[in-house]
Image (spheres, grey):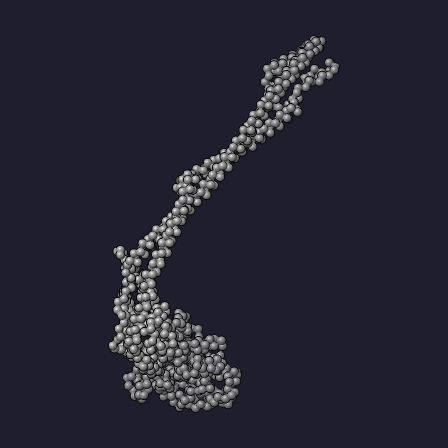
Amino acid sequence: MSLNNANLPQESSKRDIRVDAPVELVTGHANDFLSNNDVESEELGGGGIGVSQILHALRRRWLPAFSIGIVLATAGVALAWVLDVPEYTTRAMLRISSSQGSLLKQDGEKTGDFDVYKLTHRQLLRGPFVINAALRDPEVAKLPVIKEKVDPVSWLQGALSVNFPDNAEIMEVKLSGESPQSISKIVNAVVQAYMDEVVDAEANMRRSRLSSLERAYSETENELRSKRSEFRRLADTLGTGDTASLSLVQQNALQQFAALRSELTRVQLDLLRAKGKLAGIQSSVAANLTEPVVAKKPVVEEEENAPDAKQDVPLEEDSDVELQNILASDEVIAALKSQIMQLEAEILNVEQTAVPGIQEQYVGKYRDTIVELEEHVRLRKDQIVKGRAQWQAANFKASVDKARSEVVLLEQMEKQLVDSVTTFEKEAKQFGRSSIDVEMMRTEIDSLEGILSRLGHEIENTKIELKSDSRVTFFQDAQPPKSKNPRSFAKIGMFGFAGMMIPVAGFVFWDLRSQRINAPSDISKNLRINVLGAIPFVPRSVLVNSSRNSKKQEYWKNLIAESVGGIVARLFRPSATRQYRVVMISSALAGEGKTTLAGQIAYALAESGARTILVDFDLRRPALDTAFDVNLVPGVTEWLSGEVEIQDAIQETGMRNLDIIAAGDWGHNSFRELTSNRMDAFFKKLRQEYDYVIVDGSPILPVVDARLIGQYVDGVVMAVLRDISRGVKVEEARELLNVFNVPFLGAVVVGITKEDVYNYTSQRNRKKQLVHVES
């Protein structure tokens, strides 16, 4: 068994080509059709539809789209030709002036106002009011084209064309039909009804408007006259009608009111203090009258010889400090006390110096004199106290009278101020209300004067308009046309273009909904999947002449070898963290190039000198046995069921360093064997015998086989076929692998154009070996 060539994608339905070019593996170079392609460095692309997606969809579907489009375009052109029957067209013209004709020279209207005026009259001419008036014309009503219509009003509204050519002041009224006499009569009848019912009615409306304006002017003038009379009466009452003067008067009144309120508050406080003072004086008088201050005579012992019989008894201590000060400053009392002190000094001197007989004689005499002097002191104090009490009584009475007079005066002032404050408060409020009334009345008068002025201006303008020419004048009536209109080739072309584009748009929309992969960037950016490389399509001309060794054949062989070599170098290059030795090649759905990719990778590894084995685990739809021309059995199924040993299932491909295990004969128990313990032993045995194990797995989404086999491999590479694979299915397949904890290494795009591949052809005939991993 030999492998002359391997399967590669091409631009045919089978997508097979046989090549035997050696594969040059450049470590670290990989497939450089994308730079920095790792998913971690890619930004998530937008999901919107762009021009590129539309062009790719059109590229895929152009043949059926344009084929059906040509058929529909032809049918559309034929239909337009049949429907576009040449008819007669007649037209009448009226002049719409851009400004109102006036006896006085005035500026023209604004462009916006004129545009609105034109649109309004176009709608009026096509309105049911004018159309009904035209159809009431007996000459028009008996026309066959009118009689055969179920709703002639609606038909005429739709068929009648009213426009302004070149946006000029000319209004063109057109109607098309098969009878030139009928359409000309209808157009003339419509124009005449428009002139009678709209244009002439405008003059009547102006007259009616003039009457309304004059009536409103008279009513406004009477109301203004009444308001002015009322304003004069109010101004006479206030003394002025000027708002500023009223504000000044009101401000003065408020200032006087504030001053009176402040004075009233001060007087009330003074009154409270005066009443308190009067109450205090009256309380003091009552206290002094009930407890008078007197000097008491000292008590003397009856026995004259008692030691203290002649001793003075002082006056009771008085609480009146003022009285004590008066007594202390009295000269008589001071002289008497001085004599008493001298006598007491003499007694002391006699007692110290005289003999006892003489002491008694002089001491007794001195003591009698002291008693007399003390009696004089007491009498003098009584005299002073009585005099002071009389003075105090008179002083208290004067103070009470003064305080009462002050209270009476303050009460009178309070009453006068209260009356004044009340009066000024009423005046201030009255001035406030009056000033507001004056201001409101003045505003009403100003408003009425403005309205009266505008009414007068409108009346004068309306009178001038009644004497001016109408803005709408008849310019040209409709004449029966002599020739039919030419066919509208623009309309026919639009039908053809629509017939062409409808199927094209439909096919493009249908293709866009499928979200097919157009380029490697759709995977790396939109799906955030690491792209390991890409394999180009091989043109049919290369496949037909595959036996010839031409430059073109050599170019494609080198290009494919470079592409596959880059994928292998990137996938199996030595790593400090992990070395991938058992890799499964799968796809989201069937027919997406996984078998082709698996064969090319195995071929490249064997060419590099690594012992490689290719295992067909697509048990339900095997293809490697046909591609490499080996027997289907014995294979994986027979080994899993225990029918053969693993060495019996291994077959040679005829290529050095490359062996193969076919799928075998699929049976009902084969699925159960995929979950048995023999799977682990199967892959352990292959790891011991070979450097690399490439597994051609089944599609991920349709069946569960690939997910189960993925538990025993180092990683899965997904083949994505350009123009066939769908992005949503690729994403679903990757998520399903993540659910089963199957390592996902990236994707390889199969079938891209040669421009998308890094076009590098080595000029040096050399090979670089992969690092051999010992088991």
24 or 281, which is in the foreground? Answer: 281
Q: Where does the C terminus fall, quadrant-wise? A: bottom left
Image location of residue 736, percent across then percent down: 47, 77
Image location of residue 482, percent across then percent down: 25, 77
692 or 452, which is in the foreground? Answer: 452
Residue 52 sits in which quadrant? Answer: bottom left
Do we see residue 772 in this rendering?
A: no
Image location of residue 198, percent across then percent down: 33, 65
471 or 640, which is in the foreground? Answer: 471
The residue located at (49%, 39%) in the rendering is 426
Q: Where does the N terminus fall, quadrant-wise? A: bottom left
The residue located at (35%, 71%) in the rendering is 136
Do we see residue 677 in this rendering?
A: yes
> In this rendering, would 473 be left or right of 680?
left
Judged from this view, the residue extending furthest toward the left is: 482
Judged from this view, the residue extending furthest toward the front is: 138
The residue located at (31%, 56%) in the rendering is 463
The residue located at (62%, 28%) in the rendering is 283
Whether 122 is drawn above or below 311: the answer is below
> In this rendering, would 278 be left or right of 14?
right
Q: How many labels does the image show?
A: 0
